[in-house]
Amino acid sequence: MKTRTKSIIIHSTPEKVFAYMDSLGNTGMHMTQSNMPMMGGKLELKQLSQNSTGPHAKFQWKGNVLWMKLDFTVEVTEWEKNKVKVWETLAEAKIIILSWYRMRLQLTPVKEGTMADLSISFTTPQTVFEKILAFFLADWYANWCLKNMLYDSKKALEQK
């Protein structure tokens, strides 16, 4: 298992940062738009649980990248309002370069606003083709996701 972590200060309160980043529609926005890192593909997000936030909130990501189907479900496994959110993939995840991941968001009040620490722990697939792709792309993709999630949140929250 590998882990990548990024941090950023967002000039807003922990309550506002958490409310924004608790929504997978906000933090996963980079995966719902066709772009180069997604190889022109994009994913759709579907809520599976009755609750959209909090413990056991569950979502499905589905779509195509380079004619390959992606389909995986994530569930919130730890949630402390305005402080911590952890979510991870369930069962067999079809993600091409990752076979499983867990993301952790931790917020800490600081003088300038809120320190947002975001990490992703992941494992890579076992098929030869996917192992090769993961060798070249998994670390880069994990960092790209973290960067987008944090900077998109910072931009959205500091514009208001």
Image: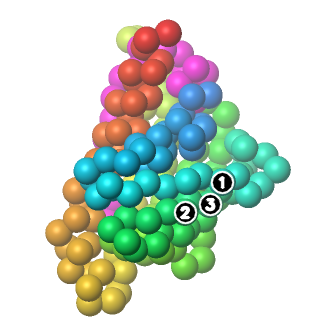
**Label 3 amino acid?**
Gln
Q: Are marks 2 and 1 in contact (CB under 8 Å)?
A: yes
Q: Position of residue 149 (x, y in %)?
A: 41, 39
Q: Is residue 92 above or below residue 155?
A: below
> Residue under circle 2?
62
Q: Residue at x 35, y 87 (%)?
A: 126
Q: Position of residue 143 (x, y in %)?
A: 28, 50
Disc 1 + disc 3, Cβ < 8 Å: yes
The residue depicted at 42 percent of the width and 14 percent of the height is 158
Task: Name the residue type under label 1.
Answer: Lys
Kindly report which numbered mark, 2 or 3, lies closer to the viewer in this rendering.
2
- Tell me the element at label 1: strand
Residue 45 at x, y = what percent?
Answer: 59, 52
Where residue 113 sits, quadrant-wise, is: top left
Q: Secondary structure at mark 2?
A: strand
What residue did someone put label 1 on? 46
Residue 160, x across and y down, in percent:
50, 9
Mark 3 element type: strand
**Taking 131 as reference, is 156 above or below it?**
above
Magenta stretch in the rendered image: 1-18
Q: Do the numbered discs 2 and 3 sit on residues whose CB atoms are within 8 Å?
A: yes
Q: As displayed, is residue 1 above or below residue 106?
A: below
> Real-space Cα distance between discs 2 and 3?
6 Å
Residue 60 is marked as 3
Counting residues from the start of the chain, the first of labels 1 and 3 encountered is 1
Q: Is residue 10 found inside the magenta-colored segment of the image?
A: yes
Judge the density around disc 1: few (<14), some (14-19), many (≥20) Cα neighbours within 10 Å.
some
Residue 14 in view, yes or no: yes
Query: Which of the labelled discs sits on residue 15, or is there none?
Result: none
